[in-house]
Image: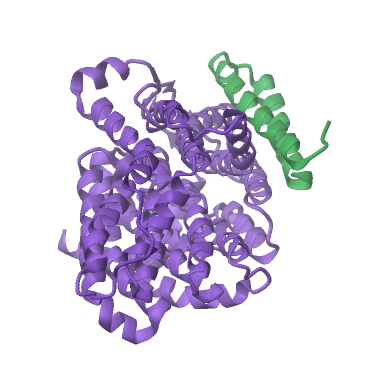
Amino acid sequence: MFKDKFTRQTLAFALIALSSALFYPAAQNGWNYLTWILLALIAAASLLTLLIA
Amino acid sequence: MPLLASIPILVILILMVGYRWGAARAGAAGYLAALVVAIGFFGAGADALAYAHVKGLILTFDVLFIVWAAFLLYRVADEAGAIKVIGQALPNLTADRGMQAILIGWVFASFLQGAGGFGVPVAVTAPLLVGLGFSPLTAVVVPSIGHGWAVTFGSLGSSFQALMSSTGLDQATLAPGAALFLGISALVTGPMVAHSADGWSGVKRLTVKALILGTVMGAAQYAIAVAGLWNIAAFGGGLAGLIVSVPLARWGQTNHLSKERTDGKKLFVALSAYSILVVLTVVILLVPAIKDFMGQAAIQVQFPETVTSLGYVSPAGANRPVRIFTHAGAILLYTSVIAFFVYCRAGLCKVGAAKAILNDTVKKMMASSLSILEMVAMATVMQQAGMTEALAQGLAGAVGAAFPVIAPWIGGIGAFMTGSNTNSNVVFGALQMRTAELLSLSVPLILAGQTAGAALASVAAPTKVVVGASTAGMAGKEGEVLRALLIYTVLLVLLISGLTLLAVWLF
């Protein structure tokens, strides 16, 4: 699944972009738990980038 | 607090320079550092962080739309052999080696920066110069210095778009100062290129021609940027330079006639992609009825006020509208599609060309897209958490009235470290603006210093030097290239420093 650098970068990019988009409904509706979950997801994607991209 | 706020930026700079990490990995580390400092020390809550990421996503789209589409257009033209045709026509104009260096390493490199960017100017022109008999070191140094003045408005305006997005200011506010500073630096660039290629004798022999070319290119870029067509300003400057260089190269020469004649029709077809771009840009951006009709669809989000637990307030407001169909990226996309069919009709398309172009665009752009996304997210988190404000206050207190001198160096260091004028504008744009506001200095002039300093220093960034050196057979000798480049780069940023101080003092 993470066979090459390009795949890993694409995956991290998609994960961060998608999570960022979901922040809007989370913040608008006051769903703070979703915000923290999304933040954790983005942090994980960033860690993925940091370690193997 | 300012020291804490500077941690994410320091993380990026240390990892990229000290440990030679790529921008994507260093950006991720900087983003994580920003998140930790924002939550742990600046009291950013869920709402502030959530809106910071939404703002970051819009800003990223705004910047990446143009970055991707600009590279796509370059690939369409390159696949059809257009870049090669233009590059081969130039050396036929003159037998003077210094003038050849100016034509290819300055004028053509600037045109390529306007149209493509992303390391293309050096990658395309360095091998051409080596082929003409220049040493590999000169072949890398000449186009590196040569295209710096065109970086901000180059890549069809990517870095300028980043400056507008990160500060929320429009073209009318930012373009005049930036184009003026960069235009003046173009005047100095010509003699520098002549010096690098042919020593002081080259400077003596070619300064008048270089000044004429520099004036034409700088003035064209300024006029186009101020007229509202900032996305083709550097491209227009480079094109004006190419047109003027034909008679100028032959002026005063007796042995200019080349054995090879340039095929005018071939050159005309080669330039058609860029002719289409100019026509579409002018029609879409300058015809009010078309601009208004196409500009209706926009991404604009209303953000509520957020307050951190330390009491920092991010006021409510909407982002700068991102108009989908009149966006510079959209115009480039239309141009790419039309140009592709024009080239195919002229018989310049190979089988599977479309697939090759798309594959290459996606592969080449993904790493820089990830780094831009990470760095933008870092910048918006810092801004929403009050870290940018703390940093600006610290900076204003520390340097005070000397800030106009320092501002271009901040931009320059940012670009040197990250290898990109765009990244420097994303990371430092809001900080420079806020510091200027706190010191009651002209924001457009300080930002002009930021982006001009960044543009001129970006050419000496280690990441760019590595790529440039590899195309001229200088791999492993990057240190030599960097040393040769740094002298010119430092002089150019010093010039911008002085210009910023003078402009702030005058206005």
Q: Is residue B202 left or right of residue B373?
A: left
Kindly identify the residue that appears in the image at 34 percent across and 34 percent down. Answer: B277
For residue B97, above or below residue B228: below
Q: Nearer the viewer, residue B428 or B473?
A: B473
Total labels: the figure holds 0
Q: Nearer the viewer, residue B162 or B356?
A: B356
- At which x and y percent is residue B484? 50, 77
Q: Is residue B442 left or right of residue B367?
A: left
Q: Is residue B342 left or right of residue B384?
A: left
- At which x and y percent is residue B262? 35, 54
Kindly identify the residue that appears in the image at 30 percent across and 67 percent down. Answer: B257
State which quadrant residue B450 falls in: bottom left
> Is any part of residue B441 visible from this angle?
no
Q: Nearer the viewer, residue B265 or B208?
A: B265
For residue B281, above or below residue B247: above
Q: Colour of chain B?
A: purple
Kindly identify the residue that appears in the image at 30 percent across and 50 percent down. Answer: B239
The chain coloured green is A
- At which x and y percent is residue A20? 60, 27
Q: Residue furthest left?
A: B506
Say how the picture is coloured.
by chain
In which quadrant is the C terminus of chain B drawn?
Answer: bottom left
For residue B424, above or below residue B360: below
- At which x and y percent is residue B461? 54, 63
Kindly identify the residue that appears in the image at 23 percent across and 58 percent down. Answer: B244
Q: Residue furthest front?
A: B259
> Is any part of residue B429 visible from this angle?
yes
Q: Is residue B48 left or right of residue B500?
A: right
